[in-house]
Protein backbone atom coordinates (compact mmCIF):
# COMPACT_ATOMS: atom_id res chain seq x y z
CA UNK A 1 0.00 0.00 0.00
CA UNK A 2 2.90 2.32 0.68
CA UNK A 3 4.49 1.49 -2.68
CA UNK A 4 1.15 2.18 -4.42
CA UNK A 5 0.92 5.49 -2.51
CA UNK A 6 -2.41 4.48 -0.98
CA UNK A 7 -0.80 5.16 2.38
CA UNK A 8 2.08 7.52 3.08
CA UNK A 9 3.09 6.67 6.66
CA UNK A 10 1.51 3.49 8.01
CA UNK A 11 -0.95 0.66 7.37
CA UNK A 12 -2.43 -1.17 10.35
CA UNK A 13 -4.98 -3.96 10.64
CA UNK A 14 -7.12 -4.48 13.76
CA UNK A 15 -9.44 -7.21 15.00
CA UNK A 16 -13.00 -6.20 15.99
CA UNK A 17 -11.98 -6.04 19.66
CA UNK A 18 -9.26 -3.47 18.88
CA UNK A 19 -6.21 -5.75 18.94
CA UNK A 20 -3.66 -4.79 16.29
CA UNK A 21 -2.51 -7.62 14.04
CA UNK A 22 1.24 -8.19 13.81
CA UNK A 23 3.05 -6.30 11.07
CA UNK A 24 4.43 -9.65 9.92
CA UNK A 25 0.90 -10.98 9.24
CA UNK A 26 0.22 -11.55 5.56
CA UNK A 27 -2.58 -9.56 3.95
CA UNK A 28 -4.01 -12.77 2.46
CA UNK A 29 -4.35 -14.24 5.98
CA UNK A 30 -6.18 -11.16 7.23
CA UNK A 31 -8.47 -11.18 4.16
CA UNK A 32 -9.69 -14.67 5.16
CA UNK A 33 -11.20 -13.26 8.37
CA UNK A 34 -14.91 -12.36 8.34
CA UNK A 35 -14.24 -8.75 9.35
CA UNK A 36 -11.41 -6.45 10.37
CA UNK A 37 -10.54 -2.76 10.65
CA UNK A 38 -7.96 -1.08 8.39
CA UNK A 39 -6.23 2.16 9.44
CA UNK A 40 -4.21 4.19 6.94
CA UNK A 41 -1.85 6.93 8.10
CA UNK A 42 -3.34 7.13 11.61
CA UNK A 43 -6.54 8.88 10.46
CA UNK A 44 -8.37 6.98 7.68
CA UNK A 45 -10.23 3.96 9.08
CA UNK A 46 -12.22 1.36 7.18
CA UNK A 47 -14.38 -1.47 8.51
CA UNK A 48 -14.10 -4.41 6.13
CA UNK A 49 -16.62 -7.28 6.06
CA UNK A 50 -15.96 -10.32 3.89
CA UNK A 51 -18.78 -11.98 1.98
CA UNK A 52 -16.74 -15.14 1.43
CA UNK A 53 -15.40 -15.69 4.94
CA UNK A 54 -16.82 -18.38 7.17
CA UNK A 55 -20.32 -17.77 8.53
CA UNK A 56 -20.02 -16.20 11.94
CA UNK A 57 -22.58 -14.28 13.91
CA UNK A 58 -21.48 -10.64 13.88
CA UNK A 59 -23.87 -9.62 16.63
CA UNK A 60 -26.70 -10.88 18.82
CA UNK A 61 -30.10 -11.04 17.13
CA UNK A 62 -33.50 -11.07 18.79
CA UNK A 63 -36.11 -13.70 17.81
CA UNK A 64 -37.93 -11.11 15.67
CA UNK A 65 -34.72 -10.20 13.89
CA UNK A 66 -33.91 -13.88 13.34
CA UNK A 67 -37.33 -14.42 11.70
CA UNK A 68 -36.73 -11.38 9.50
CA UNK A 69 -33.29 -12.71 8.46
CA UNK A 70 -34.60 -16.21 7.67
CA UNK A 71 -37.49 -14.82 5.60
CA UNK A 72 -35.19 -12.42 3.74
CA UNK A 73 -32.72 -15.16 2.86
CA UNK A 74 -35.27 -17.84 1.95
CA UNK A 75 -38.04 -15.83 0.26
CA UNK A 76 -36.10 -12.95 -1.30
CA UNK A 77 -32.67 -14.55 -1.84
CA UNK A 78 -30.87 -11.74 0.05
CA UNK A 79 -27.41 -12.50 1.42
CA UNK A 80 -27.25 -13.20 5.14
CA UNK A 81 -24.99 -10.19 5.81
CA UNK A 82 -27.41 -7.79 4.09
CA UNK A 83 -30.39 -9.46 5.78
CA UNK A 84 -28.74 -8.96 9.20
CA UNK A 85 -28.25 -5.26 8.54
CA UNK A 86 -31.84 -4.89 7.32
CA UNK A 87 -33.12 -6.80 10.36
CA UNK A 88 -31.39 -4.35 12.72
CA UNK A 89 -32.96 -1.39 10.91
CA UNK A 90 -36.36 -3.09 10.90
CA UNK A 91 -36.05 -3.84 14.63
CA UNK A 92 -35.19 -0.21 15.46
CA UNK A 93 -38.26 1.10 13.59
CA UNK A 94 -40.58 -1.53 15.11
CA UNK A 95 -39.20 -0.84 18.60
CA UNK A 96 -39.90 2.87 18.19
CA UNK A 97 -43.43 2.20 16.93
CA UNK A 98 -44.16 -0.16 19.84
CA UNK A 99 -43.11 2.52 22.36
CA UNK A 100 -45.24 5.19 20.67
CA UNK A 101 -48.91 6.02 21.20
CA UNK A 102 -50.98 3.30 19.41
CA UNK A 103 -53.47 5.92 18.22
CA UNK A 104 -50.83 8.12 16.60
CA UNK A 105 -51.08 9.01 12.92
CA UNK A 106 -47.74 9.31 11.10
CA UNK A 107 -46.95 11.62 8.20
CA UNK A 108 -44.45 10.84 5.47
CA UNK A 109 -41.96 13.06 7.26
CA UNK A 110 -42.46 11.11 10.52
CA UNK A 111 -41.76 7.82 8.76
CA UNK A 112 -38.71 9.32 7.04
CA UNK A 113 -37.38 10.52 10.41
CA UNK A 114 -37.92 7.06 11.93
CA UNK A 115 -35.95 5.44 9.11
CA UNK A 116 -33.21 8.09 9.34
CA UNK A 117 -32.94 7.59 13.10
CA UNK A 118 -32.82 3.79 12.69
CA UNK A 119 -30.02 4.11 10.12
CA UNK A 120 -28.10 6.53 12.34
CA UNK A 121 -28.50 4.23 15.35
CA UNK A 122 -27.22 1.27 13.31
CA UNK A 123 -24.24 3.28 12.07
CA UNK A 124 -23.40 4.32 15.61
CA UNK A 125 -23.64 0.70 16.77
CA UNK A 126 -21.41 -0.55 13.95
CA UNK A 127 -18.81 2.17 14.55
CA UNK A 128 -18.66 1.46 18.27
Image: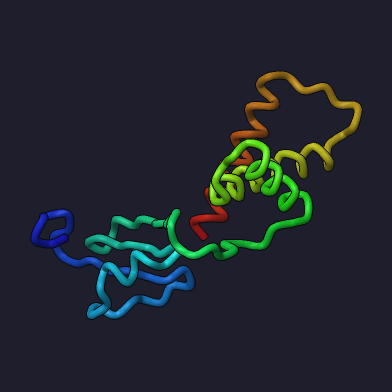
In the visual, does 34 lie left or right of 115?
left
Q: Which of these two is toward me, 55 or 61?
A: 55
In the figure, residue 107 lies in which quadrant? top right
Question: Residue at the spot x=63%, y=34% of the render?
Answer: 115
Q: Residue furthest left?
A: 3
In the figure, residue 11 lies in which quadrant? bottom left
In the visual, does 96 lie left or right of 10?
right
Place of residue 95 in the rendered image (x, y in percent of width and height, measured from the top left): 77, 44
In the visual, does 94 lie left or right of 84?
right
Question: Residue at the spot x=61%, y=43% of the render?
Answer: 86
In the figure, residue 83 lies in which quadrant? top right
Q: Quadrant of the N terminus?
A: bottom left
Place of residue 68 in the rendered image (x, y in percent of width and height, measured from the top left): 71, 45
Question: Residue at the spot x=29%, y=58% of the render?
Answer: 43
Q: Residue furthest right?
A: 103
Kindly tell me whether residue 29 is visible in this rendering. Answer: yes
Q: Is residue 115 above or below residue 12?
A: above
Place of residue 114 in the rendered image (x, y in percent of width and height, measured from the top left): 67, 34
Q: Which of these two is toward me, 38 or 75?
A: 75
How does the figure colour the protein chain or chains? rainbow
Q: Is residue 38 above or below residue 104?
A: below
Number of numbered discs overlaid on the protein picture: 0
Kindly tell me whether residue 89 is visible in this rendering. Answer: no
Place of residue 89 in the rendered image (x, y in percent of width and height, measured from the top left): 64, 43
Question: Residue at the spot x=15%, y=65% of the render?
Answer: 9
In the visual, does 103 lie left or right of 109?
right
Amino acid sequence: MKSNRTAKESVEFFSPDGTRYSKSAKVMEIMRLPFFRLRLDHWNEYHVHSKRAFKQSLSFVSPGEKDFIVNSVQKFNISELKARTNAKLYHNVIDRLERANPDAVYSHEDVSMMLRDAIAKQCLSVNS
